[in-house]
Image (tube, rainbow, N blue to C red):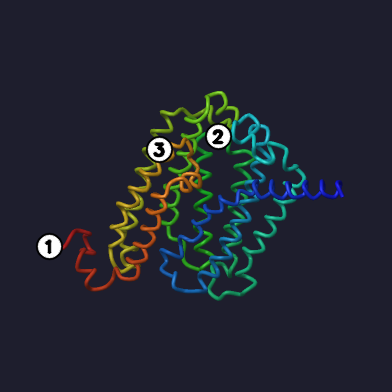
Amino acid sequence: MGQRGGQSDKSSSMVVALLQAMRIPHWLKNVFVIIPILFAGVFRQPEAWLQCGFAVGAFCLLSSAVYLINDICDRQADRAHPDKCNRPIASGRLSLAVAIIAAVFLIVAGFGLAVAPVLRSVAGSVWGGWGLAVWAAAYLVLNLLYSIWLKHYPIIDVILVSLGFVLRAVAGAAAIAVPISPWLVVCTFTLCLYIALSKRRAELADLPEDVAATSRTVNREYSPGELDRMLTVSAAMAIMTYALYCLAPRTVNHIGSAHLVWTIPLVIYGLFRYDCVSRRMHKGDVVNVLLADRILWLVVTTYVVLVVVVILYGSHPAALAILDMETGTLSP
């Protein structure tokens, strides 16, 4: 009985370690897959949500596989980090064999969900329904290159992290068979570049220089001053590209009004609030920051509600009288 109990406890601890290594709370990042449903204005269509559900599920599984692969590659460096040394693979609570098998299984299961639109023969899907699978494959390849090789190169590392979020968003668009807007790519990239740089800045601020360099070799090439300048530029780019998107003729014509401009102050406040919270916490990861700050959740919720209201009612004659759609200036 004692031996059986010991084996049971060992199996349970292995499952717990595997779930921790999969970083399930970080599935929150896959909210970027849902963005196209909102801005394409198809959030009232149940079929679109079903297709989006396949996409979100696929990226949750694939992102967990990527986390496992990344932790396998980083296990030596993680052991030198005061927090990352407790990760299941670095600490030895999760064996390499189990981690590799789990990563392969998650990849297979993730692509199983990604090809679901093909199996369901959804008419009008991008590339005959293969769009989601193609972008999911691109996401996996990008992250493999990042984990194995390119994360050691400064600036390239944060660009690739940002592109990972872009691929989530364009996969969401392909899943619901809507055209991929260049604005979706640009706005997502600039926002996530800012988030990725915030994480690097937090790592340097939180750790002694030698520890930061040992745990992530690319940190040897960054300095706090350089990252602050990059953060300033990336924040300005994110705000400017979003403002240009709100005022773009294509956006105004699609929504039927220019009232998305009222969301710009929320975006600015959210970025600045994120910067303040991440610096105070010395945590740049978007999940950790969001989980620690209720005000940011309120900002995000208010933003989504406002966008929905603009899409649904912004083209009402009474609303159109507020803004001049040609010039974007206040009506006299």
- The answer to whether 312 is drawn above or below residue 3 in the figure is below
Q: x, y (%) of residue 263? A: 32, 56
2 vs 3, front mark: 3
Could you tell me the amino acid type at mark 3? Leu
Could you tell me the amino acid type at mark 2? Tyr
Please tell me which residue lies in front, 176 or 86.
86
- Tell me which label, 2 or 1, sits earlier in the chain: 2
Distance, label 3 to label 1, CA atoms, is 38 Å
Q: Are marks 2 and 1 in contact (CB under 8 Å)?
A: no
Residue underneath mark 1: 332
Please report the residue visible at 44 percent of the width from the left and 29 percent of the height from the top.
224
Distance, label 2 to label 3, CA atoms, is 18 Å
The label number, if any, that marks residue 231 in the structure image: 3
Q: Residues within 10 Å of mark 3 (few under 14, many from 20)?
A: many
**Outermost front residue:** 1
Please tell me which residue lies in front, 303 or 223.
303
Residue underneath mark 2: 153
Q: x, y (%) of residue 157? A: 53, 39
- Tell me which label, 3 or 1, sits earlier in the chain: 3
User: Regarding mark 3 in the picture, which secondary structure is present there?
Assistant: helix
